[in-house]
Amino acid sequence: MNGNLRRIALFAGHNSFEVRDSHAGYDLAGIDDTANDLQRDRISSRDGVVSVGTARRRRVPVVVEISAHAPADDLDGWDHVAETSVDVDSGRILVLGGSESQCGAARFDLPAGTYRVRVYSEGFAAFDEDAYRVVLWPGRARATTVLKRVTGEPAGG
């Protein structure tokens, strides 16, 4: 499972993108909760879907890595780092912009199970330069944790 790394670019419509189990539906009842989580922690996890809040609504670079183990806790150089859990029942995740269709989503195959998802965010201080790294690894379900919190508003955000 290590070494499964891909660089993608997606449109962060609604200032967000998703990492979702390919069989997960849309939880319309949870939209307000998700929006509150994204505003506070820049990450939200519900019913097989992890939503990631972005600094800006634009095309953003995202590195997605599937790993067998948790990443090192090196947070230097990142503006914000948060971690949550997601159940992947289908054995496939999709990564797509908050307003993009699943048809064009990046797809990653992995063993079904529960995964930890850590999202690293950078470039908040520079106008139009935010970028993201998403690492998934097998783990048990745990509450969302912010390991490093960005302060202030993004430049030009």
Image: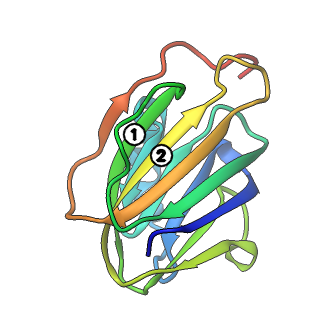
Count the labels in the image.
2
Q: Are marks 1 and 2 in contact (CB under 8 Å)?
A: yes
Question: Helix, strand or loop at disc 2?
Answer: strand
Report x, y in % for residue 11: 76, 52
Q: Label 2 sits on what residue type?
A: Val
Q: Position of residue 120 (x, y in %)?
A: 50, 40
Corner quadrant of residue 8: bottom right
Q: Which quarter shows the C terminus? A: top right
Location of residue 5 with respect to 130 vertically, above or below: below
The answer, for residue 100, to whether it is visible in the render is: yes
Please report the residue visible at 76 percent of the width from the left and 74 percent of the height from the top: 104
Residue 35 lies left or right of residue 138; in this view the side is right
What number is the disc on residue 82? Answer: 1
Q: Label 1 sits on what residue type?
A: Ala
| Label 2 Cα crowd, 10 Å radius (few <14 / some 14-19 / many 20+) | many
Task: Identify the residue at image location x=46%, y=56%.
Answer: 135
Foreground pick, 67 / 136: 67
Q: Residue at x 32, y 61 (%)?
A: 69
Closest to the observer, 52 or 69: 69
x and y percent of residue 48 in the render?
A: 39, 70
Q: Is residue 121 above or below residue 14?
A: above
- The residue where tag 2 is placed is 119
* Scheme by which the image is coloured: rainbow
Q: Residue at x 71, y 16 (%)?
A: 155
**Which quadrant of the rendered structure holds the N terminus?**
bottom left
Is 83 positioned to the left or the right of 3 in the image? left
Indicate which disc, 1 or 2, sits on the residue closer to the N terminus: 1
Residue found at the far top of this picture: 152
